Image (cartoon, helix red, strand yellow):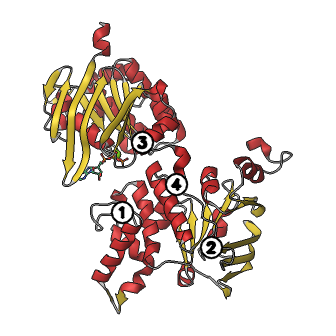
Amino acid sequence: MPTTALADHVLLDGVSKQFGSTRAVESVDLAIRRGECHALIGENGAGKSTLGKVVAGVHEPGTGTVAVAGEMVRFRSPRQALEHGITMVAQELSLVPTRSVLENVYLGIESSRGPLVDDVGHRRLFAELAERSRIRLEPDRRVGTLGIADQQKVEILRALARDAELIVMDEPTARLSADETTDLLAVIRDLVGSGTTVVFVSHFLDQVLEVADRITVLRDGRLIRTADAVDETPATLVEAMIGRSLAANFPRKVPPAADSPLILSATGLGRVGVFEEVDIAVRAGEIVALSGLVGSGRSEVVRGIYGADRLDAGAIRLEGEPATLRSPHDAIARGIGMIPESRRDQGLMARRSVRENASLPRLDLFTMGPVVADRRERVAVAEATTEVDLRCASLDMPVDSLSGGNQQKCLFARWMIDRPRLLIADEPTRGVDVGAKRAIYELLARLAAEGMGVLLVSSEIEEVLGLAHRILVMRGGRIVTELDGTVATEGEVLEAAFGTSTEDHSDA
Ligand SMILES: Nc1ncnc2c1ncn2[C@@H]1O[C@H](COP(=O)(O)OP(=O)(O)OP(=O)(O)O)[C@@H](O)[C@H]1O
Ligand SMILES: [Mg+2]
């Protein structure tokens, strides 16, 4: 019956959900059609997960109604949702690592013959399921020995074994490699092809455009629009997500004053086998970008300036004074701050609170003898987090419970407590959503306008062109070109990064 094929599978009418004073979802009317892949997108905190959880019975809506196949429902638990054929594959997978794939798939719904679990029956069902979903997994493999991608497939098989007709997947590709992602997207298309409804929560626009039939954009808990994927592009989606167009994405460039002093003057920097003869000058109020391909030596150079890596050659002057920086500790004491390339490995202490992470480099300011002046620290951190627009329910939350954008802002908050003269920002917007990106751009521009020198490393050419007053392009451990950031083009930066047309062009 074609009418049922197109019918609404789940219909939300005026659904709102509030947590304390946070309105996570507000007055959302949403129709999810049977057999479609329906993507939910939006910035961090837009309400995607909350909405998915309302559909899957994890949250009860505060107000509004939910209908499944035309019937009003009021789920009080995921189990009740599952009785209506709805389940969720959450980011935190819920498998038993010590059990086999087969056992995990049938855990809790075993059909038994007397006291024995019906192993033969399960194997037959498993084979059918594998056939139907085209998900191939070894039934006797222990789940704990599988990678994330395969564990996710076990979760999908579990859902199917429970006769799920609608599966909510919350950021299922967030931790997958490119190949694994391609594979999972194919599984999703197969599921949809065989009649399963999939709600796909993601902030990867290319994936959403590839896999979804329809896309709903959320912003601040509200539904902005639902449209056919074929009618959307990355640009239209971004605009809907952030409420303005991409062209306006960079703050206005304010050039440094003609007589503004040199903050950093590094000459002849070298590290054997990594980079050589690197000269970098940054003036107060200036944003200087180090551009170039991954591996060209950008991060190594800034780590050398920061004292995180040894330098074999060269001299550094800070505000005209010679400086010997043997460690980040020396660098911080001389007025240099750094946002490291990897916030996980080099930056944040994941389990520690926002407060501890923000005050870390300047704990000395709050320490009197053996004790930390708790109140002064709190006040300083509160001011710093407000300044960078970091949003969190409490400063005592562990930093890894924040969205990527807010984690990155926490790294910036560190340097608001006692401002450095020079801020080194290595890939400051990696892995953050468009809204947080914009906030970070504004922050960098404002800090420079207030007189800080900024040394930016970025792989995003758009970002380099949008922010920098001057662009230094590195190739093979040397600075090969200097460009004026107000007039440089993407082509010029790329040409310098790859080399002239006669060399190195093969991997362009
Ligand atoms: N259990 C909860 N308790 C309190 N606040 C919550 C809870 N769950 C979500 N929120 C808040 O509700 C808002 C929407 O959050 P939600 O997790 O739905 O957003 P999201 O679009 O999934 O974001 P992300 O892209 O970061 O995953 C946020 O402000 C969030 O802090
Ligand atoms: Mg979410």
Q: x, y percentage for residue 258?
A: 69, 74
The quadrant where residue 317 appears: bottom right
Q: Residues within 10 Å of mark 1 (few under 14, many from 20)?
A: many
Nearest to the eye among marks 2 and 3: give it: 3
Q: Determine contact: label 1, label 3, CB under 8 Å.
A: no
Q: Identify the residue under disc 3.
A: 241
Q: How far is the residue under mark 3 from the one under mark 4?
A: 19 Å
Question: Of callouts 2 and 3, which one flags the residue occurring earlier in the amino acid sequence?
Answer: 3
Q: Earlier in the sequence, mark 2 or mark 1?
A: 2
Q: Quadrant of residue 480?
A: bottom right
Mark 4 vs mark 2: give the one in front: 4
Q: CA distance from mark 4 to mark 2?
A: 22 Å
Q: Is mark 3 within 8 Å of ligand 1?
A: no
Query: What's under tag 4, amino acid-wise?
Result: Arg
The alpha-carbon separation of the residues under discs 4 and 1 comes to: 17 Å
Measuring 51% from the left and 66% from the top, which residue is drawn there? Answer: 446
Q: Secondary structure at mark 2?
A: loop
Secondary structure found at label 1:
helix
Q: Secondary structure at mark 3?
A: helix
Residue type (three-letter) at the residue carrying disc 3: Met
First of labels 4, 1 by sequence position: 1
Residue drawn at point x = 46 percent, y = 79 percent: 418
| Residue 309 badge | 2
- Residue pointed to by mark 1: 399
- Of the 4 image quadrants, the one containing the C terminus is top right
Amino acid of disc 1? Val
Label 2: how many residues lie within 10 Å, few (<14), some (14-19) or many (20+)? some
Counting residues from the N terminus, which is met first, the one under dot 1 or under dot 3? 3
Front disc: 1 or 3: 3
Residue beneath disc 4: 430
